[in-house]
Amino acid sequence: MLIFKNNIYRKQYGEFLALSTVQDFSTEFDPHHFVKACLDEEVELLDLIKSHPQEFWRDDLAGFYPRSHRFGELPVLRKLIEILLEGLECKEHWYHMNTYHFSLLYDGLNRFAYNYNHDSPQEKLKSLPEMQGKPIYFEQFVDDYFFNTVFLLTEDAYNRLSGKEKQDLGYTCPCQFGAVNGLKPCPEEMELQIAKDYPYPVYV
């Protein structure tokens, strides 16, 4: 199970968590299904890109993955998607993600939400029936579930920050230097990290 700022699995267990300030968004929205539907679609998208002539891959990835294409060619992004899908559905462990994972998720989820919001009512019901055709407020989702968005900074903006400034801004996610600066992740950096403890507050 993937660790976000708030628990994306609560709705699966009948728990209601009102986070959003947008009326009706929290009650209809299932964050786990949103992430799962997106990742499934990413597998299909990468398969489609792979079917194109290889000389077009770089431009295709830049268009579909405006942030994460900087650090990953197609095999890297495909492997990261597979790792995220496995972690999302694994019930044995909670997994910490790093900036490579969050950057790739942001690209995919942002595109998925945009396409959903511009789909016909029939297509909306097919992809996320629980939403009953209501829009996805992606910025609200990011506020509610992402720890930070350091990967949205340009290389110059990030590298100008001092260590203290990064700490003060909450930019403490592992692998942020590599992701922002477009460094290819090594195999260890692509893996999720098992949490030692339950990652959310327990209310008794």
Image (tube, rainbow, N blue to C red):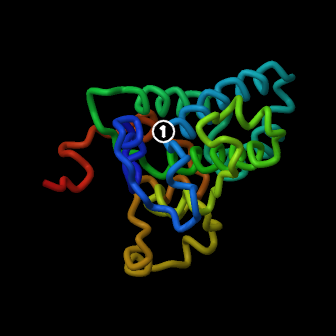
The residue most toward the left is 204
- Can you say which quadrant of the picture contains the C terminus? bottom left
The picture places residue 162, in percent across and down from the top left corner, at: 45, 79
- Residue pointed to by mark 1: 32
Along the line of sight, the residue nearer the viewer: 27 or 169: 27
Choose top left, top right, bottom left or bottom right for residue 126.
top right
Secondary structure, mark 1, is helix
- In the image, taking residue 42 as reference, residue 151 lies left or right, namely left
User: In the rendered view, would you say 55 is above or below 23?
Assistant: above
- Describe residue 16's horizontal placement relative to residue 184 as left or right: left
Horizontal and vertical percent for residue 91? 31, 27
Give the residue drawn at x 57%, y 40%: 34
Q: Nearer the viewer, residue 21 or 179?
A: 21
The residue that appears at 22% across and 56% down in the rendered structure is 201
Is residue 118 found left or right of 47 in the rendered image? right
Q: Residue furthest top?
A: 51
83 or 184: nearer the viewer? 83
Viewport quadrant of the N terminus: top left
Give the image location of residue 119, x and y in percent.
Answer: 81, 41
At which x and y percent is residue 114? 75, 49
Indicate whether 21 appears above or below 3.
below
Residue type at mark 1? His
Which residue shows up at 36% across the image and 26% down it?
Answer: 90
Q: Name the quadrant containing residue 86.
A: top left
Residue beneath the point at 60% across and 50% down: 106
